[in-house]
Amino acid sequence: MSKTTAPWWKSATAYQIYPRSFCDSNGDGIGDIPGIISKLDYLADLEVGFIWLSPVYRSPMADNGYDISDYQDIAPEFGTLDDFDRLASEARDRGIGIVMDLVVNHTSDEHAWFVDARSGRQADKRDFYIWRDPAADGGPPNDMQSFFGGPAWTLDDSTGQYYLHLFDRKQPDLNWENPALRAEIWSMMNWWLDRGIAGFRMDVIDLIGKDIDRGILADGPRLHEYLQEMHRETLAGRDVVTVGEAWSATPENALLYAGRDRSELSMVFQFEHVSQQWDEKLGKWKPKPFDLVALKRTLNKWQAALAEDGWNSLFWGNHDLPRAVSKYGDDQQYRVESAKMLATVLHLMKGTPYIYQGEEFGMTNAVYTEIGQFRDVETLNYYELQVAAGISPQDFIAGANANGRDNARTPVQWSDAPQAGFSSGTPWIDVNPNYTRINAQQACLDPASIHAHYRRLVQLRKELPLIVDGDYQPWLEAHPQLFAYSRHLDGQTLSVVANFGATGLQLDVPPGMQVSGQALIGNYSSRERIGPQLSLEPYEAFAILS
Ligand code: TEU
Ligand code: CA
């Protein structure tokens, strides 16, 4: 078997932690860094290579930490810098890197830069943000809308100008055209890198090159210039992983971020497979039936586009998205089977897989009945706007239950103890009542659990260079219920077959797909052969090495 020469993050599996919801060590209802440290053995047992830690910086928490008021300190509810250093070193002892969330499209309005900037038009840091005069009628300079709903401009009364915020009004956008601002960011990044972190996940990084006056937000004219400057000033010569969140990324421009000669990022998160499942007009708030063929075409297209250069990130969920098993599988009768099926399909593709906390034992969407149960700023803002526009509260809540961000933010279900073992106090957001059945403790005791299946997939990626480097060939892309592909390296073939439906499936197998070999993994009985005929159980998935 050939030894892989790929960088460490190509054979590693990532694990995302949303600190507020992960583990609360002191009973205040909010997850924290000591809580994360207490679960490092659990993560080491899963053999993850690095943790993407959602923001733990000082923040007024208007957007749960994506509104940072001090980049070089830790939010008191999460702990201290000492706690952070202990987390990084204890993780390192277990072979796990910590990847920080770099949120530099915007800060909090409580960041010292913004406090100074709004103190007067001549203020030292005024130009760190984006200011415009009011329109002739005194209203916003243009009709640009925030991603969280409502105008992207808020008037600063005392200085008489509007500032730009593409997210909440408490998240003013930084002015990347200012070289002094960029220098501050490079020095802040170096400060973290020198502390020994394993890299950065970069929040909405495709927005930093924006050209407001020409209405260009994502993928703006100076984006790649800034990323190359960032690389030169901070990342060059360091063995770290970087992943840029890029909702605008296409297979065509992904190589601009992550091509081997670009000196920018290791990879991007692309969202084509996510947003294509949303309503064309009403977006994610309008539930839409799942379209497997569209999903396959997109994932297959990305596999092909980054086959020779660049690198894919592989994920079903994150802290902004619904729970994978609820969105793409069946979170009732076939929860275990479908969660394993989804993991199999994703983790055996080419790229770096990301597990979102709780996904590894099949946590499901929350089912809320009242708007008062939701916590997310995006959901609450859109509720106001859409109900005012005539959508019924029930319809909106149905959409939020399907695609809202709080689904991913209910506390991690560690055990069947009160509050799912997450906290000895009252959690900041309700636990999902199904924690008595669905929890990590139960999953770790059961050798046939979803958790055991994930663990095996993580191990396979470390053991088999074919999973890291092998090329990718899709099969039967137009089939409405089957997801199948093969991987190839040095004369070996890995065949992956999955039934995305709750009914059995009979198939005539094309000759090129017929193989026999070693059963690697599966969610029903062991399979060593894909014959001319194939009969699959509901949500069955398996892989064969030949
Ligand atoms: O998300 C970017 C983003 O665009 C999402 O808010 C997205 O629009 C939404 O979830 C889908 O409707 C990043 C972070 O991941 C998110 O948590 C932050 O709220 C946001 O940036 C602002 O920092
Ligand atoms: Ca706490």
Image (spheres, helix red, strand yellow):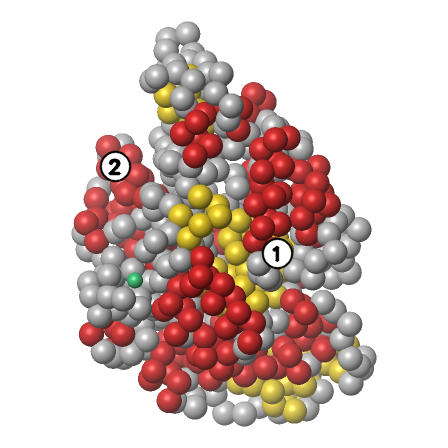
In the image, taking residue 126 as reference, residue 11 lies left or right, namely: right
Residue 274 coordinates in the image, percent (x, y): 49, 54
* Residue pointed to by mark 2: 384
| Sequence-earlier tag: 1 or 2 | 1
Q: Determine if residue 218 is in view.
A: no
Decide: is 375 above or below 135: below
Depth check: 243 or 301 in front?
243
The single residue placed furthest to the top in the displayed view is: 136
Decide: is 426 above or below 510: above
Quadrant in the rendering for residue 282: top left
Depth check: 294 or 494 in front?
494
Q: Quadrant of the C terminus?
A: bottom right
The residue depicted at 37 percent of the width and 21 percent of the height is 156
The residue depicted at 55 percent of the width and 60 percent of the height is 99
* Residue pointed to by mark 1: 194
Q: Amino acid at mark 2?
A: Glu
Residue 181 coordinates in the image, percent (x, y): 58, 33
Q: Residues within 10 Å of mark 1 (few under 14, many from 20)?
A: few
In the image, taking residue 456 as reference, residue 369 lies left or right, namely: left
Residue 146, labelled with which disc? none
Q: Amino acid at mark 1?
A: Asp
Q: Residues within 10 Å of mark 2 (few under 14, many from 20)?
A: some
Decide: is 36 above or below 517: above
Q: Determine if residue 190 is in view.
A: yes
Residue 384 coordinates in the image, percent (x, y): 25, 37
Could you say whether the residue bearing mark 1 is in a helix, strand or loop?
helix
Q: Quadrant of the N terminus?
A: bottom right
Could you say whether the residue bearing mark 2 is in a helix, strand or loop?
helix
In the image, taking residue 135 as reference, residue 349 lies left or right, namely: right
The residue depicted at 48 percent of the width and 46 percent of the height is 71
Depth check: 123 or 2 in front?
123
Distance of label 1 from label 2 (alpha carbons):
44 Å
